[in-house]
Image (tube, helix red, strand yellow):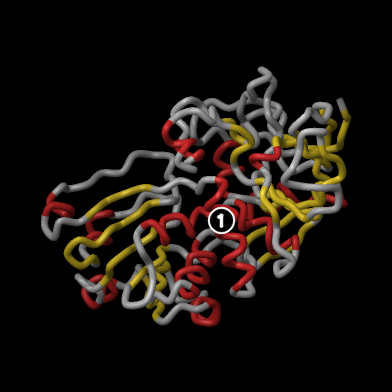
Amino acid sequence: MTTVAAYAAPAAKAPLERTTIERRAVREFDVLIDIKFAGICHSDIHQAQEGWGKAIFPMVPGHEIAGIVSEVGPGVTKFQVGDRVGVGCLVDSCRECDNCKAGLEQYCTGGSVGTYNAIGKDGEPTYGGYSEKVVVDENFVLGIPEGIALDEAAPLLCAGITLYSPLKHWNAGPGKKVAIVGMGGLGHMGVKIAHALGAEVTVLSQSLRKQEDGLKLGADHYYATSDPKTFEELRGTLDLIVSTVSAPLDLGSYLSLLKTDGALVNVGAPEEPVSLNLFSVISGRKTLAGSGIGGIQETQEMLDFCAEHGFGAEIELISAEQINEAYERVLASDVRYRFVIDTATI
C-alpha cells in the first residue's frame, strides 16, 4: 500500500479538501501512474453532490487522468516505466459478457468498475484522479501519443471519447450535417472531432456568446437556441444531433430539426426526467438515443485520431486549491472549455 495526497469530498455537497488515501500495492498486471493532470468533468460535480443518486464518501473524483508510468507489475506487457498514459472512466469490467468481448466495456452487463465512486473487485472503494498517483490494471490504461500535450490530453479520456463514440457510431463524416448542442467541455470536443471527421458542423448554443470560438474550432454554422427563428430555419435539415447539455431540453423542438431517419443522441445526463410526445419520433422515423463513453480500444483510437489531427482539449489549468471555485464556475458555464488540475499542486 502507498499513501498519497488527494482532494476529496468528505460528504455530499461538501467542499473538497486535501486528504490522504491508500493506493494498493502493484499487482502482477498493474501499472502505477504518477498523475500529472486531472480534468474536471461535470460528472464529478453530479456525483460529489449526489445528483445522480447515492454515492460513496469520502469521494476522490476525477476520471480524466494523464500521467507517466512509474512502476509496472511483472506480468505487464503493454506499458513500461516512462510511458505517457491516461485513464478514463473505467478501471475494470467483468471481461466476460458479450459487450466486454466486443470491446464495449462501457456497457458491461457483468459489472464495470468506475474510476471513482465505485467498489472494485477487491471490495475496496475506487478513488479517482484528483490525487498524486493511481494503480490501474494495464487493460484499462491508454497510451497517450506524443502529438498531444499531457494537460490537453487529460479531458480526452472522458470528454473526447464521449463525443467520438457517438459521432463514429452514427457515421458523422463527409456529406453529413451534424449539430452539437452546448458549447462547453463536451461540446467543444464534439465540434473539433466532427469537423476532423469531415462533417458539416453546426453549434446550437443558448446564445451567440461563444460563436467566435465555435467557428475557430471547426464549426461551419452557429445558432442561438434562445432565438425561436433558429428552430424554424433549421427544421428538417440535420442528419445527427448530439446533445451535451445536462439540463432538460424540449426534445420535440430538437427532433424537429432532423431529416427523415435522423438521430438525436444524448450524452449529457440531466438529473431529472424529461418528457416526450412520441409523435416527435414517429413522424420522420427518427431516433432518440443515448451514448456512454467508449470501450478501451475505441478510446485508444480516439486518442490516436486526435494526435493525428493535431488537437487536444481547450483547457484552463488550475491548482488543486482552486477546485471548489472551479466547480462553481462549471455550474455557471464559466470555463473555456475544460478545467484541468495540475496535480503537482496537491
Residue 223, x across and y down, in percent: 37, 75
State the residue at coordinates (59%, 74%): 309
State the residue at coordinates (11%, 57%): 283
Is 219 left, or right, of 65 in this rendering?
left
Tell which of 58 and 201 is nearer to you.
201
Is 129 left, or right, of 226 in this rendering?
right
State the residue at coordinates (39%, 80%): 221
Tell which of 81 and 89 is nearer to you.
81
The type of residue carrying mark 1 is Ala
Residue 287, x across and y down, in percent: 24, 53
Residue 175 higher or lower than 158, as above or below: below
Question: Could you tell me which quadrant the N terminus lies in?
Answer: top right
Residue 126, x across and y down, in percent: 68, 29
- Give the residue furthest to the top: 123
Residue 152 higher or lower than 331, as above or below: below
Residue 273, x across and y down, in percent: 34, 39
Task: Report which quarter residue 16 is drawn in.
Answer: top right
State the residue at coordinates (25%, 70%): 231
Is 219 left, or right, of 22 in this rendering?
left
Per the image, label 1 sits on a secondary structure element best described as helix
Q: Which residue is mark 1?
A: 159
